[in-house]
Structure formats: structure tokens, C-alpha cells
């Protein structure tokens, strides 16, 4: 006998439920968590290296870093904090909430102020998977071209903050900054767009934003 | 290629809703364009995933609702040809809405002769 069974259920329900548990765990530990999403080569790890260096003595930091293979990024970041967990996803093109849940069991969450989850380099796949983070941060770079925000609307639409990296390369590559800004604003009128150069060690807008968000989160919890 | 992980998530949900001894014939899903799923890649991943489960005949029917734009000035909502379309009223900041659905709508199954009635099957799946 053939029958149609109505279901109408969110396909990513299991991931979302684990993400909710992660978020509760982060909030209980008073640690502010961001999911950093960007293309391969956009400078995610380099940005984090400099961020961790500049926050030394100001905030206690940890990182969960996802890559298909190798522990190279984890090793780079371990020079700046001892709280680093590397996840290798194999063929997986994004992190999911369960992978993050297993990773954070290896971290002393209550001893951290800020935890950054560096997602697998990809502008599409990671966007649909909630990890339990407090904020999603999208990273673009000048060398990728000025059309990437318009071509990846889901990330721009859902990001809490956006970063444009490698602005030191603007004299050398064709990149229309006003056009990029306009594409971002068309999709997301709220998220700050921070223009930085890791190579020139100019990332103040980003570190100030990150610290302010972490402080705000702590204040909201204690009040 | 996140279509394969999505196909596996989808199959996990379907298995939890499948009546005992039933065979899966088809699944209907609605995937909003925000998820960046390529229909051809999704079909390929689905075929690989269902073959492994022993349901090579199972079809995947994908409904992709279009993007919608909403004009905060006049309240108009429409399906645009391009993401950067302006509203007819002249307002420049139309906002993107919708497109983030990812739902399993229904499954078509063949019940084994031993299995109970369709009503029992629905009851087993928790569906209304």
C-alpha cells in the first residue's frame, strides 16, 4: 500500500538542538563566542593570530579551528593561546554543532572571555549550520574581488559583523570599495563593516568591536 | 560539497519518521535559496545516500521558493529578477526576506502488508 506521510519538519533540527545546548553552555560559562566564516585565503587565521596577540593581557581567548586536513592552523594559533582545538573535517566543507560540542569539552570555557570558532574556508556551506555562537562574522578580502558580497548573500544577510581584509592591496588590484559597501548595505543594513589590513597590523575596528561585544554580553548576563 | 551532509541529515530525519518495515519511495523537501544548495548536486548526493540505505528507487522532489524583496517604505513584497532591484515606489533600500526554509514536507512510502493502516503509519510518524 502506497501512502504519503506529511511531516513538515526542519531538516537541520538535530543540528539546531545541539547548537542550542552549545549556546547555553557558552552563556553559562560567560564566554562570548563568534563563528568566523570566510573563503580559503581570505586571511582568517592571519587575522586571528594578530587578534590573539593584541588581546593578550586584555581578554582570555580560545579557538576552535576547522580544516579539512592538517593541524597547521591550530599550530599557528597555539603560539598565542594554549586553548586551541583543531577539528579535521575530512571531506566535510563546514563545521556542525556536534563537532563543536565535542571540541569544547576539551576547553576550560569558564576560564575564557572570548572563543573564536574559525570555520572551514568556504562562503556557502558553513552559513546554514548554527554552531551555538553568539555572533556570526563574515570575512572578505580585497584579493577575492568586489563582487563576493553580492554573490554570497546568505552570509551577508545573516552576519552580525563583516570584515574586509587586505585593504593594503587596494592600489594593486581592481576592487571597487563603494560598490562592495553598497552590495553589503543592500543585504544587511545593521552589521558593521570593518575594513582592516592584517599585513599592516591595522585591525583596531575589529578588536574594538569584538571586545565591546564580549563586554556587552558579560554585562547582560550579570544584570 | 555540503549537499552530501545535507542529504545525510535529511535521511536521518526520514528514518526517524518511517513506519516500521516501510520502503521509502520519495521525499518532498522545500529548500530556500539562502542555503546555497545546487539542485543537481543535491540529487547526486541523494542518490548516493539512498543507495547506501537500500532504497535506490527513492526520489527526491525539491521545491525551491524564490527570493522575496520587501520595501519598507510602501510595504510591497515581490519576487525580484535580481537581488539589487529597486521598488517601483522609488525607495532604494528594498530588503531581502524569506528564502531560509529547509523543510521535509512529506514522504511517500510503501507499507509492508504486515504493517498497519495508513492511519497507524501516520500515528507512528507523529504526523497529524
Image (cartoon, coloured by chain):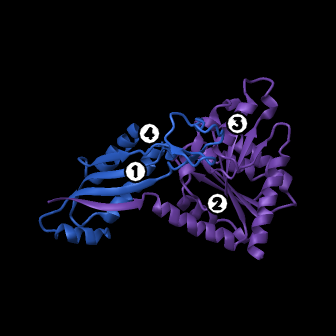
Residue B30, disc: 1
Cα–Cα gap, marks 1 and 4: 13 Å
Task: For residue A70, say whether it is visible.
Answer: no
Horizontally, is A52 left or right of B33 in the view? right
How packed is label 3: few (under 14 Cα within 10 Å), some, or many (20 or more)?
some
Asked if marks 1 and 4 fall on the same chain, the answer is: yes
> Which mark lies nearer to you, 3 or 4?
3
Do circles 1 and 2 both sit on a common chain?
Answer: no
Relative to B112, residue B54 above or below? above
Q: Chain B hue?
A: blue
Q: Return the residue at label 3.
A: A182
What residue does disc 2 label?
Answer: A133
**Disc 2 from disc 4: Cα separation:** 26 Å
The structure residue drawn at horizontal position 71% and vertical position 50%, both measured from the top left corner, is A191
Please name the residue that numbered disc 4 is placed on: B38
Numbered disc in front, either 3 or 1: 3
Chain A painted colour: purple
Can residue B70 be seen from the camera position used here? Answer: yes
Residue A131 in the image: state x and y as whole percent.
58, 59
- Crowding near pointer 2: few (<14 within 10 Å), some, many (20+)? many
Distance from Cα at disc 3 to Cα at disc 1: 31 Å
**Front-lying residue, A113 or B91:** B91
Q: Residues within 10 Å of mark 4 (few under 14, many from 20)?
A: few
Amino acid at each position: 500500500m502506497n501512502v504519503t506521510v506529511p511531516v513538515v519538519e526542519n531538516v537541520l533540527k538535530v543540528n539546531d538542538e545541539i547548537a542550542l545546548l552549545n549556546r547555553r553552555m557558552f552563556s553559562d560559562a560567560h564566554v562570548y563566542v563568534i563563528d568566523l566564516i570566510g573563503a580559503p585565503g581570505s586571511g582568517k587565521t592571519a587575522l586571528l593570530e594578530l587578534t590573539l596577540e593584541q588581546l593578550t593581557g586584555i581578554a582570555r581567548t580560545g579557538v576552535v579551528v576547522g580544516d579539512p586536513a592538517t593541524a597547521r592552523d591550530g599550530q599557528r594559533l597555539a603560539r598565542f593561546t594554549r586553548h586551541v582545538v583543531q577539528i579535521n573535517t575530512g571531506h566535510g566543507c563546514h563545521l556542525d554543532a556536534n563537532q563543536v560540542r565535542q571540541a569544547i569539552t576539551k576547553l576550560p570555557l569558564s576560564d575564557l572571555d572570548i572563543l573564536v570558532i574559525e570555520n572551514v574556508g568556504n562562503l556557502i556551506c558553513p552559513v546554514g549550520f548554527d554552531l551555538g555562537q553568539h555572533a556570526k562574522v563574515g570575512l572578505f578580502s580585497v584579493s577575492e574581488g568586489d563582487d563576493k558580497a553580492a554573490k554570497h548573500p546568505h552570509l551577508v544577510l545573516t552576519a552580525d559583523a563583516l570584515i574586509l581584509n587586505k585593504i593594503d592591496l587596494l592600489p594593486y588590484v581592481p576592487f571597487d570599495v563603494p560598490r562592495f559597501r553598497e552590495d553589503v548595505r543592500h543585504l544587511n543594513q545593521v552589521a558593521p563593516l570593518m575594513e582592516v589590513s592584517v599585513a599592516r597590523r591595522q585591525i583596531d575596528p575589529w578588536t574594538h568591536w569584538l571586545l565591546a561585544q564580549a563586554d556587552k554580553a558579560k554585562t547582560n548576563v550579570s544584570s | 560539497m555540503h549537499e552530501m551532509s545535507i542529504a545525510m541529515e535529511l535521511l536521518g530525519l526520514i528514518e526517524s519518521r518511517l513506519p516500521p518495515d516501510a520502503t521509502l519511495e520519495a521525499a518532498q523537501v522545500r529548500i530556500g535559496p539562502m542555503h546555497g544548495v545546487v539542485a543537481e548536486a543535491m540529487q547526486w548526493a541523494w542518490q548516493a545516500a539512498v543507495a547506501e540505505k537500500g532504497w535506490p528507487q527513492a526520489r527526491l522532489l525539491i521545491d525551491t521558493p524564490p527570493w522575496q524583496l520587501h520595501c519598507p517604505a510602501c510595504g510591497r513584497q515581490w519576487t525580484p529578477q535580481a537581488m539589487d532591484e529597486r521598488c517601483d515606489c522609488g525607495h532604494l533600500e528594498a530588503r531581502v526576506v524569506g528564502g531560509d526554509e529547509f523543510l521535509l514536507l512529506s514522504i511517500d512510502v510503501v507499507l509492508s502488508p504486515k504493517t498497519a493502516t495508513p492511519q497507524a503509519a501516520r500515528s507512528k510518524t507523529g504526523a497529524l
